[in-house]
Image (cartoon, rainbow, N blue to C red):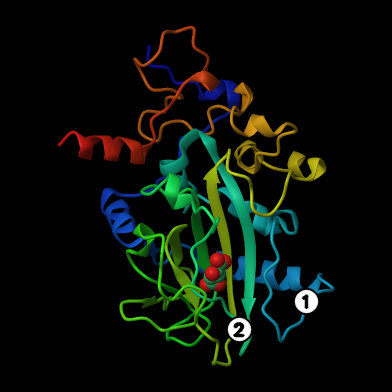
Amino acid sequence: MDRTEGAATGARKAPPGFTREQWDRFERDGFLVVEDALSQDEIGRYAEAIDRTAANDPKYDATKFYSPQNVVERDPAFAELIDHPKHIGFVWDVYGELTKLHLSQCMIRPTKSWHNLWHPDGARALPFGVFSPRLPMQLKVSYWLTDLPEPRMGNLVVMPGSHRTQYFEHYDTHDSVPGEQVVCVRRGTMTLMHCNTWHRVEPNESERVRKNVFYSYAPSWVVAEDRYTSNPEWLKTLTRERRILMRSYGHPYTNTKPPLEDFPLYLDRENGTDRDAGRYREHVELHRRKRVTTVERWLAAEASL
Ligand SMILES: O=C(O)CCC(=O)C(=O)O
């Protein structure tokens, strides 16, 4: 039986995610740019949240690179970004019902501050890509809150297609490499990066201070990057989806097998159902059912061609 069961949990349909063309580009490059994702109001609100966070932090030094983590707990504007409708559907297309916020971070990159060497995200000694050579075990969303029209403004630099290799000659250097993409963006742009994509950061030789946020997502069973669990009082202030996405479980294995009340995270965006029709006998409970992700469906269709 095909059921629509949002009413019991208050679950909502998943917001829009990848178009097929966007997914193909993301798979090809390990990187995707979506311009004008944020309104001017949102750009202002999130930039102000970064300024507030810095102003409230005794460790902040305006001359230095600043990148606090688990910022969702520091400011309501950052909590709002946990499931921002401009990106959460993209993430859900990959991680489906086990989506977790892996890291929330804001960044300030002033003139001549420290900048990263070439690296992929995640484990180095045995990278995520060894186990998951195609799908990202971690997906990094960024909202760019400063115009970065030219190189040497503290831009992110990616090597398109490099997510398919475990080795990169320029690892741990600042080398400028033929074929690299210096990410020059208008504020309000969203980018999505595959964790295996090799990337570095340009020096900031401009007078402009770069501000952005990074929100990474992963399957719930990958250990989060910036916390063990979240403050229970703070969790109570969140909406249902945001609370689930934090995956603040008292026992570690619950990340692998979340409880029934955390399902569905979202209803199917097309037909509003909480389960895939015709897969299981009726008695199998929702949290014990595998549900096919959008990306999985696309890969399966490709494989059967
Ligand atoms: O700041 C950036 O553009 C990228 C930072 C980075 O390399 C990282 O967080 O892994």
Label 2 CB sits under 8 Å from any ligand 1 atom: no
Q: Which residue is mark 2?
A: 209
Residue 164, percent across and down?
A: 35, 58
What label sits on residue 202 in the rendered view?
A: none
Q: Which residue is mark 1?
A: 60
The C terminus lies in which quarter of the figure?
top left
Mark 2: amino acid? Val
Crowd band around label 1 with a 10 angstrom C-alpha radius: few (<14), some (14–19), many (20+): some
How far, Cα to Cα, is label 2 from label 1? 14 Å
User: 8 and 172: which one is in front?
Assistant: 172
Residue 29, located in which quarter of the rendered image? bottom left
Q: Residue at x 54, y 49 (%)?
A: 217
Left or right: 280 as drawn, with respect to 305? right
- Number of marks: 2
Q: Nearer the viewer, residue 39 or 191?
A: 191
Q: Does the image show residue 272?
A: yes
In this view, which residue lies farthest toward the left?
Answer: 305
Earlier sequence position, callout 2 versus callout 1: 1
Identify the residue at horizontal 64%, vertical 76% (top origin).
Answer: 108
